[in-house]
Structures are given as C-alpha cells and as structure tokens.
Image: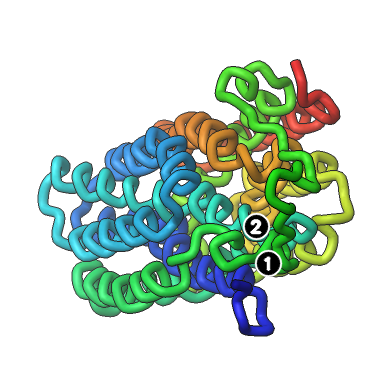
C-alpha cells in the first residue's frame, strides 16, 4: 500500500538527515577545531600533540567507512545512526574532562566511531535509495545541515567553551545530541527504502509486473569490489577527494587556532560562522545546478577557487586576508563535501552506492586523516601556518587534475 501523505516520505528522510548533519558536523568535523582550541588553552598541551589525537579521530572513522556503507545497504540506517548518536554524545561529554594524553586519545577514538556513523557515507547512503531523478538535489539538501552546523553549532560551542569551559559546554552539547538525533533515527529512519511503502524512487507508485512476467525496467548494474577498484573513474574520484579532504580537514581543524592570533577567540568564532554561511551559499547554488552540470568539471572549478584562497593565506597571514580567504575557501567546502558522493552515485548507480562509496570513503578518510597532524607539525616546526597552507594549495592542484582525469572512464 502506498504511503497516504501527499509529501513523499523520501523528503522526510532528507529533512531528518539535514538535522542530523547539523549536529554531527557542528560537534564532529567543525567541533574538533573548538576542542583543539579548548584543550590547548585549558591544559596547556601543544598544538601538535592534540592534533595527533585528532588524526586518530579521522583514522578510526576511515577504517569504519566501508563497513558503515555496507551495514546501511543491508540493514538500513536506523541502527547505524542510533549507535553513532550514542557514541557521539559520550565522546562530547567526556572531552572536557581529559587529564592525560591516553584519555584524550580514547575520547577521540570514540568520536571517530561516531563520525563514521554520522558523516558523508552515512547520510548519502541513507538518502540514495529514495531518489533517482533528484539524486543530486536530495543529497545536496541533506548535506546543507553540515553548513548549519558550521554557522550555528560550532560557534555556539566555541562561545560556550570560552565562557563556561569545555567540560560544561560538552555536557550540554551531549544532551542535545540525545534529544535531537535519537528521536529522528528511531521514528523517521525506520523505513530504509521506498519499496517498503509501496513506492518507487522519487515518489512514483511502484509498478508491480503481472505474475510470471519480466520486470518492466532492467535492473541497474551491480558493481563488485574488484570491479570498482579496477575502474579509472573510481580511482580518480577517490584520489581527488582524498587530497582535497586532507586539505579541508586540516584547514577546518586548525581554523580557530589560525585566526585567534590576529582576531582573538571571539573574532575567530565570527569568521568560522561566516565561513559556514558561505559554505551554505555554495550548497544552495549546488542544489540549483547539481543535476544539470558535469560534476567533475564543477568539482575542479571549486578546487581552483579554494587553491587561490590557500595561497593567499600562506603569503599574507594578516587579518583582512585571512577573513576574505576563509570566506572564499568556505564557499567551496560544502560543494566539495557533497560532490564526492554525487559523482559516485551518478557514475555507479544506487544499487551499489553503499558498497562503492563506502570503499572510496575509507581510502579518502585514511589519507585525509593526516591533515590535522600535517598542519600541526608544520605549524610547530616553522612557528607559522604559512608553509602548511602553501603545501595545501599544491595538494589541491593535484586533486583538481585527478578529478578531471577520470571523466568518462568508468570501466577499466
């Protein structure tokens, strides 16, 4: 029986993922910059030491990405996202109470598990089965929650840490995770696919063939792991976004620390919020054009803009340039984050998306996990973020060349 409401249930799934992404990005990806700032200030530990623990956060997440995609494909998103929310709440609650390095590593290990369960692979694998014609638009809207996390959640967390301390702010944030994400996971995400409601993707009524008749539509190709690994398209998109995310995660992790010198903690919070706002603007533009443009060309163009911003910051570490370049770089954050799953979904189809993108996400995060440590090590070695930002610009150039190299080369 078809779902009786006029609003297609898939859009409810998109809305739930939007809200979940708001908190998982605000307290996860963007939150690590606040934790880095709070721990180094309150404990007096070095930037490179805390950055190494944050690298563990991304490494743990990377090792679980393929498993997350496969679990959602097999069992649906509800158990994965429920578990991720519980672990995220635990990690955020504990981060302000660490007194030794081993405790810091343990907390970021927990948060890495939660990030794997609540990040790009999870959100896009949850949305992918519900749409075909509007695949790009649906994933883009769901991922807009990440920008709201940067605009609202991370700056509020930073303000709370500055005024009340990391421990108290972490407890409040942990409670919000439980109050918001758990009900959405349990109620809205109880249906994994439109077929469970008698619907086809995009909300069309499911067509049931007569008994003994062949299906009206040929099934989508199902990719195996070995076939995807041999595909030039898969290899190129994986390399491109691995390098782009190495840069992006490094910038986001160290953003507050980079800005607090010339701007102070309050000024850094405003710039982080402004960067999130421009990321949202990028996602709004992407929502309008994503299903009508060449995804690889768009990704390369955005990487070019971000490269200019990185080189500008590396050459002029002064407040006006840092603010302008942060805003320019932020415009591409949302688009870059979204285009990886969009390209894979478009080139490999919905049937294999969880498996294929899960493999890509594993390698992407394994490589990009080095971003925080690279930035922290170079900053402590040179006493400035300039060399790290220059290296980031070079990596972005390689990424844009890689993403263009794989156009039209799906089969090896």
Image-quadrant location for residue 11: bottom right
Q: Disc number at residue 322?
A: none
In depth, the one of 286 and 33 nearer the eye is 286
Q: Position of residue 312 (x, y in %)?
A: 70, 47
> At which x and y percent is residue 89?
27, 64
Instruction: Write down the residue under mark 1.
Output: 278
Q: Which of the marked residues, 2 or 1, is nearer the chain's N terminus?
A: 1
The residue that appears at 56% across and 58% down in the rendered structure is: 193
* Extreme-front residue of the structure: 212
The front one of 105 and 200 is 200
Real-space CA distance between mark 2 and mark 1, rounded to the nearest whole angstrom: 9 Å
Q: Is residue 351 above or below residue 91?
A: above
Residue under label 2, please give it.
334
**Direction from residue 201 to residue 76 in the image, left or right:** left
* Element carrying mark 1: helix
- How far across and down, in percent of the image, does residue 52 sit? 32, 37
Q: Nearer the viewer, residue 86 or 69?
A: 69
Q: Pinpoint residue 135: horizontal percent, then vertical percent.
A: 72, 56
Residue at the left extreme, as displayed: 99
Q: What is the count of numbered marks?
A: 2
Query: Which is closer to the viewer, label 2 or label 1?
Result: 2
Q: Is residue 82 above or below residue 298?
A: below
């Amino acid at each position: 029986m078809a779902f009786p409401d006029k609003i297609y249930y898939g859009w409810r799934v998109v809305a739930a993922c939007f809200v979940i992404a708001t908190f998982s990005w605000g307290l996860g990806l963007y939150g690590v910059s606040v934790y880095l700032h709070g721990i180094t200030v309150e404990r007096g530990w070095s930037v490179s030491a805390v950055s190494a623990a944050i690298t563990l956060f991304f490494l743990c997440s990377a090792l679980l990405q393929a498993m997350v995609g496969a679990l959602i494909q097999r069992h649906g998103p509800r158990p994965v996202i429920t578990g991720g929310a519980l672990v995220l709440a635990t990690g955020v609650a504990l981060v302000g109470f660490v007194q030794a390095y081993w405790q810091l590593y343990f907390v970021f290990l927990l948060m890495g598990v939660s990030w794997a369960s609540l990040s790009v692979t999870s959100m896009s694998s949850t949305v992918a089965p519900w749409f075909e014609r509007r695949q790009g638009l649906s994933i883009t809207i769901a991922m807009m929650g990440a920008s709201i996390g940067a605009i609202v959640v991370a700056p509020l967390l930073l303000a709370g840490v500055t005024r009340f301390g990391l421990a108290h702010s972490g407890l409040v944030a942990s409670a919000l995770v439980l109050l918001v994400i758990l009900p959405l996971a349990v109620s809205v995400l109880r249906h994994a696919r439109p077929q469970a409601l008698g619907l086809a993707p995009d909300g069309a009524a499911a067509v049931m063939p007569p008994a003994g008749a062949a299906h009206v539509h040929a099934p989508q190709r199902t990719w195996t792991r070995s076939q995807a690994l041999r595909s030039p398209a898969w290899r190129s998109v994986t390399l491109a976004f691995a390098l782009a995310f190495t840069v992006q995660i490094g910038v986001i992790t160290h953003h507050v620390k980079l800005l607090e010198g010339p701007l102070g903690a309050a000024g850094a919070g405003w710039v982080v919020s402004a960067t999130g706002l421009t990321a949202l603007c990028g996602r709004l533009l992407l929502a309008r054009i994503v299903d009508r443009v060449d995804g690889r060309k768009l990704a390369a163009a955005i990487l070019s803009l971000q490269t200019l911003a990185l080189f500008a910051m590396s050459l002029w570490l002064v407040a006006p340039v840092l603010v302008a370049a942060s805003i320019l770089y932020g415009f591409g954050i949302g688009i870059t984050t979204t285009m990886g799953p969009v390209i894979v979904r478009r080139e490999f189809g919905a049937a294999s998306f969880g498996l294929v993108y899960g493999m890509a996400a594993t390698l992407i995060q394994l490589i990009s996990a080095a971003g925080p440590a690279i930035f922290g090590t170079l900053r402590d070695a040179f006493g400035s973020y300039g060399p790290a930002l220059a290296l980031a610009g070079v990596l972005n150039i390689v990424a844009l060349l890689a993403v263009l190299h794989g156009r039209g080369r799906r089969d090896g």
